[in-house]
Amino acid sequence: MNVFIRTDAWVLASHNAGKIKELDALLAPRGLSVLGAGALGLPEPGETETSFAGNAQLKAEAAARASGRVSLADDSGLAVDALDGAPGVYSARWAGPDKDFSLAMDRVRRELKALGDVTHAARFVCVLALAHPEGEVRLYEGEVRGTLTFPPRGTGGFGYDPVFVPDGHKRTFAEMTADEKRALSHRARAFARLTADIFGS
């Protein structure tokens, strides 16, 4: 049996309720559940790496060591073409200490406006890191391209979802249902690669 498939729950190395809910829904059909790091009293390690993959691996390894369980970590963010990929790995930091993403979205809007007539093309990127407490780590990446729209629209989702319209669609992620977003999202695409590797489908 694959060493990552355990009878107990995986730990999700995140304190973000939106991510926990989304990944728990993705894992449920596999007969697995996730426990958020906060529920186990695990601290959030500093995201000191300069790439999504580096931060995801750092968080997954820390949670696996602390909990003794298979741990899954996500590092994801918005990369705006005209801003040279910013906010990128600093997506959450742009929201400030209170994680107010209205501030982050407004900063993106202002920085694009300052550049003049530039494209609003952007992409959401997600890297999932799956860490076994005995040391093995696997990484899976997914992305979805789209266009930014202002002002923000919709009340669903989280983060930058209200300003992101995925290619081929007219609604923002925040205007879609959870199931609609899940079918398109960068996180779902990374998770599809994980499930193909770990579960064989």
Image: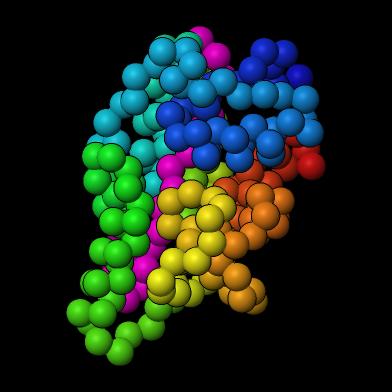
Q: Residue at x 49, y 58 (%)?
A: 161
Q: Return the residue nearer the eye: 8 or 176.
A: 176
Q: Which residues are magenta?
A: 68-89
Q: Residue at x 64, y 60 (%)?
A: 176
Q: Return the residue nearer the eye: 109 or 35.
A: 109
Instruction: Give the percent coordinates (x, y) of residue 85.
Output: 33, 65
Q: Residue at x 67, y 55 (%)?
A: 177
Instruction: Give the percent coordinates (x, y) of residue 44.
Output: 34, 25
Instruction: Give the percent coordinates (x, y) of residue 137.
Output: 51, 29
**Quarter of the image with the N terminus in it:** top right
Query: Is 121 situated above or below 50?
Result: below
| Residue at the bottom extreme of this rendering | 117
- Is 101 a magenta residue? no
- Is 74 a magenta residue? yes
Q: In the figure, is residue 182 to the left or right of 113?
A: right
Q: Residue at x 72, y 42 (%)?
A: 196
Query: Is 114 situated above or below 66?
Result: below
Query: Is 166 situated above or below 52?
Result: below
Specify the quadrant of the image occupied by residue 117. bottom left
Q: Return the residue nearer the eye: 120 or 151.
A: 151
Q: Is residue 45 visible?
A: yes
Instruction: Give the percent coordinates (x, y) of residue 186.
Output: 56, 54
Q: Is residue 90 visible?
A: no
> What colour scheme does the image use?
rainbow
